[in-house]
Amino acid sequence: MAEEMEVGCARPTGGPVGEEPSEEPVPGTQSGKESKPMIQVGKKAPDFVAPAYQKGKFISVKLSEYLGKWVLLCFYPGDFTFV
Amino acid sequence: MSIDSIYVHKMWDDNELSKMVNGGVPFPMLSDAGGRVGKAFGIFDEDAGVETRGRFIIDPEGVVQGYEVLTPPVGRNISESLRQVQAFQVVRDTKGKEATPSGWKPGKLTLKPGPDLVGKVWEVWKTDMAFD
């Protein structure tokens, strides 16, 4: 599933994949503002790729590679804080 | 997932988390530089420049079934997250024929929604079942 990454001195980055956010401002929102509405239950989660550390390896994780499994995705403010 | 780099994740796991969890964290610790993924999920705090405590349950089709978002000072209840996953699994396994009422956990009564149940929930489900 997740492939091991070659890690050099550059810090690897990820980000959303798939549909680019539409350029057209959504009616009722400020144009040019980056804020987006909260995603909705019952709707597809936005796909993404992200570098990760797991059990001694640096890997690249893509959300859509977990199709067929249940995923618990947890965000937190920073390492060395609780979850 | 946090804005910390994978190198910081490794240091945290090596120096602290592995002392709490035997063998260290078993699942991937994701890095979200710049909070781009957090923004896509709507939980990135632009002012503080960090992710808030957002937690998403994503089903095998990639559909978000539930989420919870807390500000940083309050931690999550992992048991509750797992209970919700178990409840969604029951619903999915029964193709929606069974629903899990308030306070449900594995072993407790599920409901079978339909015309016969309308107005009759009180006969099978009692308020003390909402609590552990």
Image (spheres, rainbow, N blue to C red):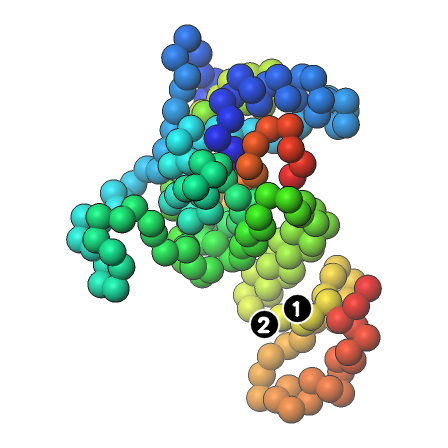
Closer to the camera in the image, A17 or B96: A17
| Residue type at tag 2 | Lys
Q: In what element is the residue under mark 1?
A: loop
Q: CA distance from mark 1 to mark 2?
A: 10 Å
Q: Which residue is mark 1?
A: B100
Q: Relative to A16, is B60 on the left or the right?
A: right
> Pointer 1 and pointer 2: residues touching (CB < 8 Å)?
no
Local packing at callout 1 (Cα closer than 10 Å; few below 14, some 14-19, many 20+) is some
Task: Tell me whether marks 1 and 2 sit on the same chain.
Answer: yes
* Residue farthest along the left direction in this orientation: A24
* Numbered label attached to residue B97: 2
Q: In this picture, is B86 found above or below B75?
A: below
Q: Depth-wise, is mark 1 or mark 2 nearer the camera?
A: 1
Q: Chain of mark 2?
A: B
Residue at image position (27%, 48%) is: A33
Residue A77 location in percent, x, y? 55, 37
Closer to the camera in the image, A12 or B125: A12
Q: How many marks?
A: 2
- The part of the image, by quadrant, that contains residue B95 is bottom right
Q: Quadrant of the C terminus of chain B?
A: bottom right
Local packing at callout 2 (Cα closer than 10 Å; few below 14, some 14-19, many 20+) is some
| Residue type at tag 1 | Thr
Q: Relative to B99, is A59 on the left or the right?
A: left
* Residue farthest along the front direction in this orientation: B47
Q: Chain of mark 1?
A: B
Residue at image position (32%, 37%) is: A17
Residue at image position (22%, 48%) is: A32
Residue B53 location in percent, x, y? 56, 45
* Residue farthest along the top direction in this orientation: A9
